[in-house]
Image: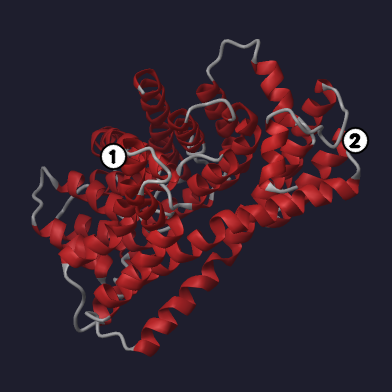
């Protein structure tokens, strides 16, 4: 089923592929998600395969013809790759250029050189926020952890006072700000405007990161006092380079796609005339694909060349940036297939009909659904995509700003209470040398603060905008 037909279904003009009642559809959703959770958490099956099997189980319990379930899943998978696959690839290339050229280290060193004991936590959340814009969470963490450990050791800082702000900056960007895979997939699922979502996401991300980062780190420091073992002190990516790009040009390159997409959003609001020449130009340069492609091409010159990269080295960097995202891309694509199956069997329509009698806000409902899936699967991306699929029909009658807020409420819910079924939990635990209990009291609580505070700001904005 194409995106157009999915929209028609949401508009109640196309019948779902099953005539099951609400009770059967509700059971089908529970079974589908239960299968997904069990496969990911108990059998440790890859999320791509788990989502595929979960989609088939969902359709089978709903009583839909299996051939139509397969068609829905395949169509959703294909449309998701078409919508976000290239953007994820371009983001990965830009992130790899930033890391390999030493640009990320240049940002870190420049900001830290101007920080003192009182401002260091604020410097860390700023660094993580800037670096976290183009980088996947895991990549950003691998880049930031050496900085956190080195700063804590050489400056005799508490690890929690330095580490929590860095983790908060990365996590907020991961959950709320495109071009990260989760927000991109949700934007594609509910047909939100990327520029508006980006602008509102940054607006919410800043105070959220401050509260969950520098502010909460004071509490976390009193709760947990750890010293990471020397064996975990890693080397930095740029130590082998003779030179690296400057601070100004690196920040310019990182922020270029953000600025281009924000320009498009601003022009769309101010001009609001599709035939206007200025708006047509802004629509082109602010298109996510063009904005990220421009940043990648610019980055080859502003990041690669100053680091002394030859054409072959730049080509090798681009090539090596794509292989690690294959798994992520397949998970996001399968999540799109799961989402489309939910829509096509009529679950979205069911939620729309039932929610008409509820007094709960659609934004709160979206957050609660994302929280439930996040707690069950441990995956923020799976939670985001699944929740977005369920909320697609409710987005049809919303304004563009409220659809963007819907994406952000889902993103906030997807970060709720990371625990033992989340790979990020174990990554933080091992790098910081903490016990499971200490990781729960710091990292897990921090993620919950981000989720709840993010929702509060989303709800507040919904009252104003």
Residue at horizontal 73 percent and vertical 52 percent from the top: 75
**Secondary structure of residue under mark 1:** helix
Picture coordinates of residue 286, whole percent (x, y): 38, 53
In this image, 353 relative to 430: left or right?
A: right
Res 63 label: 2
Residue at horizontal 51 percent and vertical 71 percent from the top: 322
User: According to the image, label 1 marks what residue?
Assistant: 213
Foreground of the two, 69 or 212? 69
Picture coordinates of residue 112, whole percent (x, y): 14, 57
Picture coordinates of residue 97, whole percent (x, y): 35, 72
Which image quarter is the C terminus in?
Answer: top left
The answer to whether 53 is drawn above or below residue 363 in the figure is below
Picture coordinates of residue 73, whole percent (x, y): 76, 50
The quadrant holding residue 27 is top right
The answer to whether 232 is drawn above or below residue 200 in the figure is below
Q: CA distance from mark 2 to mark 1?
A: 47 Å
Q: How many marks?
A: 2
Foreground of the two, 320 or 333? 333
The quadrant holding residue 194 is top left
Residue at horizontal 25 percent and vertical 69 percent from the top: 103
Residue 433 seen:
no
Foreground of the two, 418 or 440? 418
Q: Indicate the colouring scheme.
A: secondary structure
């Amino acid at each position: 089923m194409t995106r157009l037909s999915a929209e028609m279904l949401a508009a109640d003009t196309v019948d779902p592929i099953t005539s099951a009642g609400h009770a059967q559809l509700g059971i089908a959703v529970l079974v589908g998600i239960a299968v997904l959770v069990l496969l990911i958490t108990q059998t440790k099956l890859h999320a791509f395969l788990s989502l595929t099997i979960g989609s088939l189980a969902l359709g089978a319990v709903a009583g839909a013809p299996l051939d139509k379930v397969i068609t829905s899943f395949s169509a959703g998978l294909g449309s998701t790759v078409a919508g976000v696959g290239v953007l994820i690839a371009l983001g990965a290339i830009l992130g790899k250029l930033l890391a390999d050229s030493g640009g990320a280290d240049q940002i870190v060193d420049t900001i830290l050189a101007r920080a003192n004991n009182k401002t260091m936590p604020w410097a860390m959340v700023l660094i993580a926020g800037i670096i976290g814009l183009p980088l996947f969470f895991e990549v950003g963490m691998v880049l930031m952890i050496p900085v956190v450990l080195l700063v804590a050791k050489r400056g005799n800082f508490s690890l929690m006072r330095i580490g929590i702000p860095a983790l908060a900056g990365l996590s907020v960007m991961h959950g709320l700000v495109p071009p990260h895979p989760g927000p991109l997939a949700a934007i594609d699922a509910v047909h939100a405007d990327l520029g508006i979502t980006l602008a509102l996401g940054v607006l919410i991300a800043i105070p959220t990161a401050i509260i969950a980062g520098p502010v909460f780190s004071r509490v976390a420091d009193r709760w947990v006092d750890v010293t990471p073992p020397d064996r975990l002190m890693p080397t930095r990516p740029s130590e082998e380079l003779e030179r690296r790009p400057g601070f100004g040009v690196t920040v310019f390159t990182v922020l270029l796609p953000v600025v281009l997409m924000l320009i498009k959003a601003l022009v769309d609001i101010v001009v609001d005339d599709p035939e206007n020449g200025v708006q047509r130009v802004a629509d082109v340069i602010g298109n996510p694909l063009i904005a990220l492609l421009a940043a990648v091409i610019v980055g080859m010159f502003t990041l690669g060349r100053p680091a002394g990269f030859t054409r072959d080295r730049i080509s090798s960097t681009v090539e090596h940036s794509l292989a690690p995202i294959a798994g992520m891309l397949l998970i996001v694509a399968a999540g799109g297939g799961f989402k489309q199956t939910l829509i096509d069997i009529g679950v979205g329509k069911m939620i729309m009909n039932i929610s008409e009698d509820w007094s709960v806000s659609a934004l709160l409902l979206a957050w609660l659904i994302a929280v439930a899936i996040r707690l069950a699967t441990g995956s923020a991306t799976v939670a985001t995509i699944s929740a977005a699929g369920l909320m697609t029909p409710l987005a049809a009658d919303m304004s563009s700003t409220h659809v963007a807020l819907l994406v952000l409420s889902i993103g906030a819910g997807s970060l709720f209470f990371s625990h033992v079924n989340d790979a990020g939990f174990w990554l933080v635990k091992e790098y910081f040398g903490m016990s499971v209990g200490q990781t729960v009291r710091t990292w897990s609580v921090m993620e919950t603060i981000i989720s709840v505070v993010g929702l509060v700001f989303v709800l507040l904005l919904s009252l104003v905008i």
